[in-house]
Image (cartoon, grey):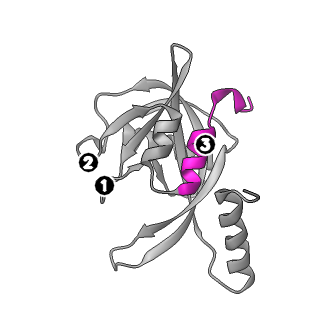
Amino acid sequence: MLVNNRTWHHSIERLRRLLGGAPSRVQVAALPYRLVDGETEIMLITSKDTGRWVLPKGWPEGDEAGHDAAGREAMEEAGIRGAIAKDETGRYFYGKGLRSGLKQRCEVIVFPLAVEQVSSKWPEKGERLRRWFKPHEAARVVNEPDLAEILADFHPAKIRP
């Protein structure tokens, strides 16, 4: 394949903007990971509305840096804390369902989070499930092809210090 999903979607987004389309809203996500016996595991959570498997994500607040917002979302949505990278590991696009039934096009910037603490209580505990997956399993259960590529290709050794 000459063009992967991420390249294709980013090209389409640039063309959409060139032709006068509204820019995508930008969200940030944490990609929570840990090493167990030398193997990488990635935590996914369920979305509140459809129950699909997703990364903890949301909107930056005020002048909050993207990586800081992603870390905050990880605590609120999954009850996890750790060292979050300041550099992104990738981006993906998806359609966020609105109450009106329409979809808002969103671009999500993904920041790796080395999980150091998993809480038993957190703000959205009663609204979501959380689970650890091997990267290839995580890639298989998410709905967004661009996110699946990010998860399948993820390895902590690729993170710049």
Q: Which residues are magenta?
A: 145-161
Reply above or below: 91 against 37.
Answer: below
Question: Residue 91's quadrant in the figure?
Answer: bottom right
Q: Residue at x 60, y 71 (%)?
A: 24
Residue located beneath label 1 in the image:
48
Task: Determine which of the numbered discs, if any, sits on residue 121 in the image.
Answer: none
Decide: marks 1, 3 in contact (CB < 8 A)? Answer: no
Instruction: Confirm whether the magenta stretch covers residue 98.
Output: no
Question: What amino acid type should be assigned to the residue bearing mark 3?
Answer: Phe
Q: Residue at x 53, y 42 (%)?
A: 30
The image quadrant where one finds the C terminus is: top right
Residue located beneath label 3 in the image:
111
Residue 111: image location, x then y, percent: 61, 42
Q: Tell me the CA gap for discs 1 and 2.
A: 6 Å
Residue 65: image location, x then y, percent: 63, 49
Q: Dot 1, crowdedness within 10 Å: few (<14), some or many (≥20)?
A: some
Of label 2 and label 3, which has the lower sequence position? 3
Q: Residue at x 31, y 42 (%)?
A: 123
Question: Residue 113's quadrant in the figure?
Answer: top right
Residue located beneath label 2 in the image:
127
Question: What amino acid type should be assigned to the residue bearing mark 2?
Answer: Glu
Dominant SS type (magenta): helix
Question: What amino acid type should be assigned to the residue bearing mark 1?
Answer: Lys
